[in-house]
Image: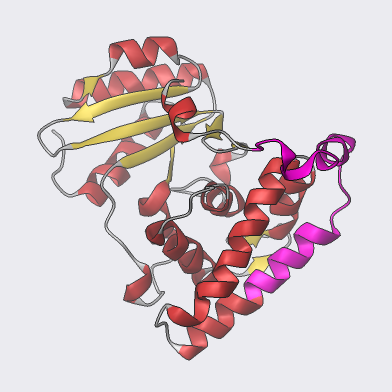
Amino acid sequence: MIHADIEEEALELVAAAGAAGATARLLGGIAVRQQTPSVEQALHRRSGDIDIAVATRGEEEAVLELLGARGYELDARFNSMNSGSRGIAHDPGNDRHVDLFVGSFEMCHTIPLEGLAAEALTIPLAELLLTKLQIVELNEKDLMDICALLAGREVDSGDAGVIDCDRVAALCADDWGLWRTAGLNLERLDGRLDELGLAVETTVTIAARREKLGRAIEERPKSRRWRMRARIGDRKRWYREADEVDEG
């Protein structure tokens, strides 16, 4: 039975996948809320869909089978075309869907999803933040998710339960396009932070952690691939358009 409450359903899907032998973890707005329960309410938003990540094709098959057994309608055409990378299951009764990512999160940029067992419910915090920072056309809800993560979690090196700035910096140092988009979005955050109506303490916390993250990204030695792409710069589009992602 599919729960009408989206967060209850999402948590049960993670638990049921685990019982079936698949390490499934949440991403998206539900994951942000699970990781930042104590931030001020203004930073939390309601999600319309459920986003889940797994590491392997075998786990993808197990989760899709689970979704079908729960009453979801599997998108056979999309799932066949994107097997091993993406899957979709529809819940018409609640007018929403489950979006399944396999091995990586691919939208404007590609974020590899490794070490999914590091967190109990969500993908690792560094990757969760990057799924927001990689959005070229950043909207209000994604900006608020970035703020929630920076307000609710420390930015530090490697420890569990923190946003691993070394991991964020390493991924950006190997991909000029990701580095460029993430940098633009951090600049957008700088320009908007004082306008969001957050408590002064929250604003100060976000600003300090954003500065630490930005410093880690800039100080990280860049790969040869990064340096080669940097020569071209903005003269060539460095990101995927939404329709290119939707087509698979």
| Residue 6 as seen in the image, left or right of residue 87 | left
Q: Which quadrant holds the N terminus?
A: top left
In the rendered image, the vertical position of residue 69 relative to residue 187, given as above or below: above
- Colouring convention used in this rendered image of the protein: secondary structure
- For the record, the magenta segment spans 209-238
x then y, percent, for residue 137: 49, 50
Residue lying at the far front of the rendered structure:
235
For image coordinates 29% across by 12% down, the residue present is 76
Q: Nearer the viewer, residue 241 or 134?
A: 241
Q: Is residue 218 magenta-colored? A: yes
User: Is residue 112 visible in the rendered structure shown here?
Assistant: no
Prevailing secondary structure of the magenta residues: helix
In the rendered image, the vertical position of residue 158 relative to residue 85, given as above or below: below
For image coordinates 90% across by 36% down, the residue present is 224
Q: Quadrant of residue 213?
A: bottom right
Q: Quadrant of residue 49?
A: top left
User: Is residue 196 visible in the rendered structure shown here?
Assistant: yes
x then y, percent, for residue 125: 56, 54
| Residue 188 as seen in the image, left or right of residue 92 | right
For image coordinates 75% across by 55% down, the residue present is 166
Q: Is residue 56 magenta-colored? A: no
| Residue 18 as seen in the image, left or right of residue 135 | left
Residue lying at the far left of the rendered structure:
93
Q: Nearer the viewer, residue 1 or 204?
A: 204
| Callout count | 0
Q: Nearer the viewer, residue 40 or 193?
A: 193
| Residue 165 as seen in the image, left or right of residue 129 | right
For image coordinates 78% across by 62% down, the residue present is 216
In the rendered image, the vertical position of residue 242 relative to residue 47, given as above or below: above
x then y, percent, for residue 187: 63, 66
x then y, percent, for residue 157: 73, 61
